[in-house]
Amino acid sequence: MSDSVITISEQTNVDMPWEERPEGCSDIVWRSRRNPVIPRDLLATSNSIFNSAVVPFRDGYAGVFRCDDKRRCMRLHFGKSKDGITWDMEPQPIVFETEDAETGKFEYAYDPRVCWIEDRYYITWCNGYHGPTIAVGYTYDFERCCLLENAFLPYNRNGVLFPRRINGKFAMLSRPSDTGHTKFGDIFYSESPDMIHWGRHRFVMGPVGDGWQSTKIGAGPVPIETEKGWLLIYHGVLNSCNGFVYSTGAALLDLEEPWKVIHRTAPYILSPQKLYECVGDVPNVVFPCAALHDKATGQIAIYYGAADTVTCMAYTRMDLLLDFVRDNSI
Amino acid sequence: MSDSVITISEQTNVDMPWEERPEGCSDIVWRSRRNPVIPRDLLATSNSIFNSAVVPFRDGYAGVFRCDDKRRCMRLHFGKSKDGITWDMEPQPIVFETEDAETGKFEYAYDPRVCWIEDRYYITWCNGYHGPTIAVGYTYDFERCCLLENAFLPYNRNGVLFPRRINGKFAMLSRPSDTGHTKFGDIFYSESPDMIHWGRHRFVMGPVGDGWQSTKIGAGPVPIETEKGWLLIYHGVLNSCNGFVYSTGAALLDLEEPWKVIHRTAPYILSPQKLYECVGDVPNVVFPCAALHDKATGQIAIYYGAADTVTCMAYTRMDLLLDFVRDNSI
Amino acid sequence: MSDSVITISEQTNVDMPWEERPEGCSDIVWRSRRNPVIPRDLLATSNSIFNSAVVPFRDGYAGVFRCDDKRRCMRLHFGKSKDGITWDMEPQPIVFETEDAETGKFEYAYDPRVCWIEDRYYITWCNGYHGPTIAVGYTYDFERCCLLENAFLPYNRNGVLFPRRINGKFAMLSRPSDTGHTKFGDIFYSESPDMIHWGRHRFVMGPVGDGWQSTKIGAGPVPIETEKGWLLIYHGVLNSCNGFVYSTGAALLDLEEPWKVIHRTAPYILSPQKLYECVGDVPNVVFPCAALHDKATGQIAIYYGAADTVTCMAYTRMDLLLDFVRDNSI
Amino acid sequence: MSDSVITISEQTNVDMPWEERPEGCSDIVWRSRRNPVIPRDLLATSNSIFNSAVVPFRDGYAGVFRCDDKRRCMRLHFGKSKDGITWDMEPQPIVFETEDAETGKFEYAYDPRVCWIEDRYYITWCNGYHGPTIAVGYTYDFERCCLLENAFLPYNRNGVLFPRRINGKFAMLSRPSDTGHTKFGDIFYSESPDMIHWGRHRFVMGPVGDGWQSTKIGAGPVPIETEKGWLLIYHGVLNSCNGFVYSTGAALLDLEEPWKVIHRTAPYILSPQKLYECVGDVPNVVFPCAALHDKATGQIAIYYGAADTVTCMAYTRMDLLLDFVRDNSI
Amino acid sequence: MSDSVITISEQTNVDMPWEERPEGCSDIVWRSRRNPVIPRDLLATSNSIFNSAVVPFRDGYAGVFRCDDKRRCMRLHFGKSKDGITWDMEPQPIVFETEDAETGKFEYAYDPRVCWIEDRYYITWCNGYHGPTIAVGYTYDFERCCLLENAFLPYNRNGVLFPRRINGKFAMLSRPSDTGHTKFGDIFYSESPDMIHWGRHRFVMGPVGDGWQSTKIGAGPVPIETEKGWLLIYHGVLNSCNGFVYSTGAALLDLEEPWKVIHRTAPYILSPQKLYECVGDVPNVVFPCAALHDKATGQIAIYYGAADTVTCMAYTRMDLLLDFVRDNSI
Amino acid sequence: MSDSVITISEQTNVDMPWEERPEGCSDIVWRSRRNPVIPRDLLATSNSIFNSAVVPFRDGYAGVFRCDDKRRCMRLHFGKSKDGITWDMEPQPIVFETEDAETGKFEYAYDPRVCWIEDRYYITWCNGYHGPTIAVGYTYDFERCCLLENAFLPYNRNGVLFPRRINGKFAMLSRPSDTGHTKFGDIFYSESPDMIHWGRHRFVMGPVGDGWQSTKIGAGPVPIETEKGWLLIYHGVLNSCNGFVYSTGAALLDLEEPWKVIHRTAPYILSPQKLYECVGDVPNVVFPCAALHDKATGQIAIYYGAADTVTCMAYTRMDLLLDFVRDNSI
C-alpha cells in the first residue's frame, strides 16, 4: 500500500482538513465552505495560485504550488502549512539544482504533483523544454529540490507518478499533447527502472462520448491504492462553442496492470458551477492536482484549481466514491 | 388563427405567467424577477435545464425540457406545471416510440420546440443521427411520445414548426448547419404534405451586419400568428474574440408566404447581461425556445435558456413588440 | 430492372464505347488509351470540362457536362455524340425553365448526374442556392430542361437518383456537406413520392480507415441494378498534407433497402496516377459521374473527371467488378 | 511639453478625478471605488459604453465614447462632464463632416483616442473602410467633427497620436492587424507632415514571452511626455484556451526617437480580476484608452473599458509608475 | 503619357521580344514557344527565378529578378539583356544603400516591380520588415540601388507604382495582407507627395464571384497608360480544396481617378495550364510582374512567373486586349 | 566506427550502386539516371513504394520498404536485392512477432529505417499506437522480425538509431509530432540502456529561417560516423500556400555528444524538382531514409522517396559532402 497518501492518521498527529457533507446534499464530492482556500494574491507578486500539490509533511503539510506571477509567468513555489488550509507560501520560486545545465534550461513550470516514493518526495510538473514535457525532481525537505531528467520527449502534460513501484518499476501516467491548446488527449502509462529512462508505454484511456470528457482527459492527483484497484481522480474536457470546460471524474485501475481500466465514471463528480470556478483567468475550470486520504476514516480531501486563478478544496469519502465509480461506470 | 399559442384565455382557466414591466424600465422585453425560474439542479441527475419548450396543457402547462445530465449528455424530459413557473420534472428522459428501429438510433436530443397542430402536440428537436438533424415526434398527453422521421438530412438545428398548415402543407423553419460549432447559419422554410417528406425549400433570412446577428441566426419559439404576419422571435449570434454571444430579436413574416420577411429588428430585444446569462456552462447566451401568448390581454411570456445552464422567463406585450419590430426594422 | 443504364444493346443500335483490357494488365478498371477523351478547351469559352454525365439517347449518346468557363464559373451544358467519345458540345449553358422564379436563382451548377426514370431523363446537380444543395430537373430531348425544386436544404453535394422507384418512391443518394471545402461526408438515402418532398432519410455509409476513403465519400454514377444488388461506384477522399486526393471504389447495396450495404471495396478501383489526373486545376482527382452498361456483354464504360480539368474514360466488366467487390470487401 | 494631457492644474480650475490608494494596497495602479463609472445603459439605446477617450475641456472634461447600440453596431458619441465621472452623453452618434464622400463611407467606428495638438483636438479611431483601419478627425468643441483621411491602408487598429510634433512631424503609433480576431500585433511608429500622408514607419515593440503580452500588444492612451521619455500605457493580450485576456502594462519611449524603447514592464500593471472586468460582452478585458495627468501633483487617472461593456477608472502617480517601469523592465 | 513603358520604338533601336499569335489560336494572350524563357537554375545558386520585373534600358533591357537561393531565401538580383529573352543575371543579390540603418534591416525581398518615373527607375517589392510590406528603392543604372522608406506599415504585398504623377502626386497600388498565406486581398490606391509619406487611400477593387478571382487579387505589371484609361494586368486567386490557383486578368482604371474601375475582365486572360505552370515549387501559379509595350505596333510582352519556379513570357496586342476588357467586363 | 553503413568494400564483394556525377553538373548530390529505381506498382497490390530503408546484407542488399496498398494502408515489406537497384519485394507485409499482444496492436507502419548495431539489424518506424509513435524491432535475416516496445509515447515520427552505443547507451533521434499533418517539428536525441526504456532527452536542432527548413525537420538515414562527427542527412519542410515541400539537407553532429550541432547546411542538398518528385500522391516531396557508404571510395548512395509514390536514388561523395556542410553552414 502506498505510503504517501494514506498516512494522515498513521504518520502524523495533525488533523486532516475536513468538512462534513452539508445537510441535504447528495453530491458525491462536496466543496469546502472556505473556498477559495488560497486566494490569487496570497503572494504580493502572484497573479494566481492554483493547480497545486499538497502532501502530509512532518507534523503538518507541505506543497508545491503553481504561482503565476504578474508577468503571467508560470512558476513553482514551496509552501508549508499546519492545517492544510492556511499556507506559508515561499515568495521566491523553487530553484532547481541540477548537474546538467541542459536540463535546467526550462522556460516555465506548471501544474505540479508531489508523490512520496520509498525515501523522498518526487515532484513532477509540466516543464518548458522546447515545448511542454514532464520534468521530474525530488525533495526531502521542501526547501531544496534536485532536478532529474525530463521523463519524456515533448510534447506532454499532466505527468503523475504512482506512489510505489509496480512490478519493480517506477510508474507514471501522462497525457501526450501538442505545442498549443491541445484539442486531443489520452492517458498513457509508462515504466522506468531508474526514474531516468522510461518505456513500455501503454494506452490507458481516452475521451469518450459527447459530454464532459469528450475532448481530452488527464490524470489528476497521485492515484490512491485501494484493495479494489488504484483510484484515479482525473480531469476531462468538453469543447463548447465558447471554449474548454474542465470537469473531474474518477476511475479504478488494475493494481498490477494499471493500464487496465476496471471502472470509470460516466458522470463527472465535480464540474465548474461556483462563481470562483466559472469566473477567472480561464473560466469554467476545476482541475484537481492532489488528494489527501485518511485510511482510518476514509476521508478524502481534494485540492483543485478553480478558473486557473485560485486554489479550492472539496471532500468525499473513500467508500462513497468507490461505490459511485462502480455504480456509474461507462 | 393558430390554436396552440393564442389560447390561454380561451381554452383554459389558468392564469398565464405574468409580471408587469418594472417602473422606469423602457425595455421592450423585461426579465422575470424570479429568474432563473428553473435551476440547473431541479433534477438530482441534471447538470443543467435550459432551451426548453412550454405550452398550455389542460388546466395548466406542459413542456419538453432539455436536461443535460452529469455526463453532459443531452436528453429531453417531460414536465408539468400548474402555473408555468413551478415544475414537476419527469426524472427519466422521454422514451420515443417508433416503428422503425433505425429512426430510434439517436445519439442525443436537444433544444426542443413544441407546437399544437390540429389534433396533437408536435415536438421538434435537434437529433443526433450521424450528425445533428431535426427530429419530429408528437404527443397527446406529455406522457408518451411517438417518433416520426427526421425531417431533413444532417446537418441541421433549430427546426420550428408553424402552428397551422399553410397552403395546405405543414411548414417548418430550420437552420442548416455543419458537424461542429457552426460559424454560419441562415433560416430556411420547408413544406411537407405528411410530416415525413419535406420540400420546396425557401431561403428566409440570414445574418446581417457586424452586430448581434452577424454570424448565424435561428428560429426560436413557434411563430405567433397575428393579423400583420407571423411574429418570429429568433436568436442571433455574434462571434467575439472570446466566443459566440447569443442574443434575441424578432421578425414579422408574411402570413401566406412566410419566407418573405416584412420586418426584422435591427437591435436585439434581449441580450445576455445578467449574471445568470453571462456565467455558466456556455457564457453569454440567451436562447428562447417557447412563448405563451394571451390573445385577450396581449401578454407574451417567453421561456429562454440562459448560459446553457438554467431556464429563465421574460415578458412583453404583443402591441409593444409589433410596434417595435415595425419601427426598428433593418 | 432499370432502363436507363442497361439498355445499350436493347434500345439502340449504336456501339457502346469499349476498349479491351490491355495485355498484362490485371487492374479491375482500366483507362482508355484515348484519355482525356474530352479536352479542357473543347469549347472556345471553356476552362475545363469534367465531372459530367452521359446516357444513351436515341441512336447515340447525350450528356450534361460541367463546363467551367474562363471566369471559372461552374455551368452545365448539353452535349450529343454518336459514339460517346466525340462530342458536340452546346456552347451555351443550359437555360433552366421554371415556374417559380425563386428556384431559378442559382449561383452555380456543377457535378451533374443524369438518370432515366419511367418517361424522362432526370438531372441532378450541385446547385448554389444560399450554399450548395441538390437541384433536380428533367429533359426529354437534351435541348430544354425543366427545373423542379431543390431536393434538400443546403448544404449538400453529389445527389444521385436511383433509376427506378423503390417501394413506390423515388430514391436518391446524397452527401450532406458544409459551405466550403468540406472535411467530412457520409452517403445518405432519401425517398420522395413526387420528386419534390423528400424524407425517410437513412444513413448508408461513411468514411473508414486511414486510407483513400478516410475523409469523405460520395456517390458517383447512377447505381446499376444487378441481381445481387445495386452496384454503386463512389468516390472517396484522403486528406494528405498537400490536399485532398479523390479515388474511386465500388459497393453493392441491397435492392429493396439500398441503405443496407452488402459489400464495399477496401481498396480503390481507380486512383489518380496518370499525369492528366495528377496535374490540373485540382491535382490528384478522379471523379466518376456516369457509367454505361451493356447488359448483353457486361461491358461497363465509366466517365470520370480528371484533375477537375478534363473528362476521361475507364472500363470494366460487370462480372469482374462484382467479384472484386465481393472478394475485397471491408 | 504636450498641452493636451498635462494641463489639469494649469489650464482649468476643475478638480481632476482622484482617489487615494486604499490602505494596505501596494498595487501600482488602483481601481476606483465607483467602478464602473459609466454603466452600459447610460444611453437608452446603448448596449455598452467602453474603450473611450476623455480629455480636459474648458472648465471640465469632454470625451469621445464608444457606444455600441442594441444592434451591437459600434458608434462614437460625444460626451461632456464637469468632474470626469458623471457624464452627459450625446444620444446621437457623431456626424463626421467630410469633403470627400469616399472617406465618409465607414461601416463602423470604435476604440477612439483624443489628442490635443497645437490648436485642436484630434480624434483617431478604428474605422471600417473595407476592413479596419485608422481614421483621423478633429474637433474644436466636441460638437462638430471634421473627418480627414484614413491614416493607413487596412488593416489596422489602435492608432494613437503623440501630443506634439516630433522633429517637425506629426507622429502616431498603431497596430497593424488582419480582417478578424487578429492573433498577432506589434506597435509601429509613423510620421506625417500633414496628417494626411504617413511614412517613415518604424517598429517599436512586439509581444514577448509566454505571459500577459505574448499574443499582441497595442498602444493605449495618448503618450504622456516626461523628462525621461514618453510614458506609454499599453494593452497586451494572452491567448488562453478559453479566449483572449487583455491586460495593461507601461513603457517608456525615447523622447525624440519614440520607436526606441527605454523600459517596458515585464509584469502587467492592471489585469482583469473584478467581476465587471471578467463578466460582460467580452470576458476578461481591461482596455485603457485615455489618461489624465496633473503635472503639479503627479496624479494620473486612467479611463479603461472593462469586459467590452462598461467604462472604469484606475489611478496611479507619475513617480510611482515611472519607478515601477524602470525597476520592472523586461 | 508615361515614358517607362511605351517607349520601345521611340527611345531604343532594339527589337521588342515578340511572337505572333499561333495559327488557329483565338486566345487574347498567347504564350511564348520558348517558355520558360528563364530556367530555375540560370544562376548556379538559384533554386528558382520568377515573379520578376523587366524594363527597356539603354540599348536593351534591364530587370530586377526574384532569385530564391537554395536556402529558399528570397532575394532580388539585377539582370541585363540585349533582347529581353537571354539574360545576364548578376550572381550576387542587390545591395541596398540606405542612410538609415533601420530601413536596411529587411529579412527577405520578393516579387519586384520596376517603374520609370521622371528621372529614374523606381523599384518596389515585398520587404520583410517585421512582416511583409512594400519597400521602395530606385536605380539609375541597374548596378546600384538606393533604398527609400517602406511605403506602408506591414502587412502588405504587391505594391505597384504608376509611371507618372497623378494630380501632382506619386501613386501606388497595393494589396494589404496579413502575416501568412493570406486568404483575403483587395487592391487599394494611395498617394504620396515625396515617395516617403503615403495617404488618401482609396479602395479600388476586391475579389468577386466564385471563380478565378474569388479569394484575393493584386496588381501585376506597372499600369500602362492609354487614352481610355490605365490598363492594369492583375492576378486573381481561387482557393481550391488543394490550394490556391493564381490566374491573370485585366482592368481599365480611370486616368485621373485610378481608384475608379471602368472595366474589369470577368474571365481570366491567362491561367495555369502548361506543365511548367502547374508543376513546380508552388503548383498552379501564373503571376505577371512586368509588361513591355510598343506604342507604335501595339505589341505587349508580359513577363510572368510560373509555378513560383521559372520565368515565362506571353504576348498580346493593345487593341485586342482593350477590346476584350471592354467586351468581357463584369 | 559503425559497421552497418561503412562496410560495403569490407564485408561484401558486391558492388555498391554508383553513378558518377554527370559532366557539367556541379550539384553536391546528383540523381540516378534510372530514377525512379522502384516503381509504385512493383507489387501487384501496391499503390506506392517509397520512404524505405536499405542496408548491405550478406552478398547483396536487404531492405524494409514502405508499401502502401490499394486501400492506401501503410505497411512494411521486406525486400532483397543483388545490386541494390533491382528488388525482390516480399508480397506480404512483415509479420511482427511479439510477446506482448498489446504492442502488436499497431494500426499502420511507415517510414522505416534499418540500423545494424552489434549483432542484429534494428528497424525503427512510425507506428500507429493510439497515434503515431516510434516502434523498434529487429531482424537477423530479413525474414522474421521481432517487435520490441515503442520507444516513446505518442506522438512521434522519424525515429532513427545511431549505429553504435554512445557512452554505453543506445541512442536515437526522433521528431515529436502531433496527431495530424504536424506544422512543427524539432529533432531530439534520447538514450536507452536496453532498447526499451528511453531518457536523457536532448534538443538537437529545429527549423530555421523562412526557407526550405522553416516549418519542421527530421532525421533521414542512419547517421554515418566520420572522424569529424556524425554525418546526418535530414529532411526539412517549407509550408507553401499550396502545401508542404520536403527537401533534404545535411548536418554534422558531435561524436560523443550528438545533440551538439557542429555544422548544418543553410541550402538544401536535394529538393523536389523532377517530375517524379513533383507529381504523385503527395506532390513536392524528396524524403531520404537510407544511405550506403563505401569507406574505401567515399561513395555515398542515398535512397529517397519521391512524391510519396516511388523510390529513387541519388549520389554524393563523403569528401564533397563534408566540405559542403562545413562551407555552407548556417
Image (cartoon, coloured by chain):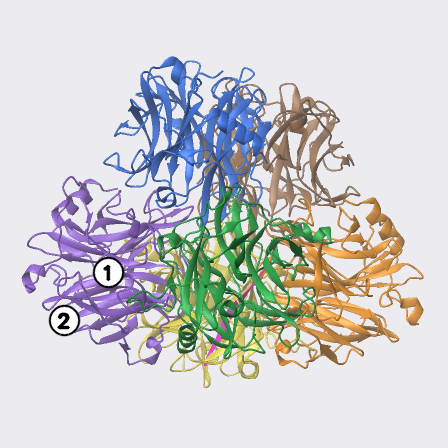
Chain colours: A yellow, B orange, C green, D brown, E blue, F purple
| D182 to the left or right of D45 | left
Quarter of the picture holding the N terminus of chain F:
bottom left
- Residue D284 is situated, as x and y percent measured from the top left of the image, at 60, 50
- Residue B17 is situated, as x and y percent measured from the top left of the image, at 86, 65
| Numbered mark located on residue B260 in the image | none
| Numbered mark located on residue F38 in the image | 1
The kind of residue tagged 2 is: Asp
The kind of residue tagged 1 is: Ile
What segment carries the magenta color? A230-240
* Camera-side residue of B282 and D211: B282
Instruction: Give whichever of discs 1 and 2 has the lower sequence position.
Output: 1
A238 within the magenta span: yes
SS at badge 1: loop
C309 within the magenta span: no
Residue at 25%, 34% in the rendered image: E43
**Residue pointed to by mark 2:** F119
Can residue E124 be seen here? no
* Camera-side residue of C268 and E290: C268
Quarter of the picture holding the C terminus of chain F:
top left
- Residue A130 is situated, as x and y percent measured from the top left of the image, at 36, 53
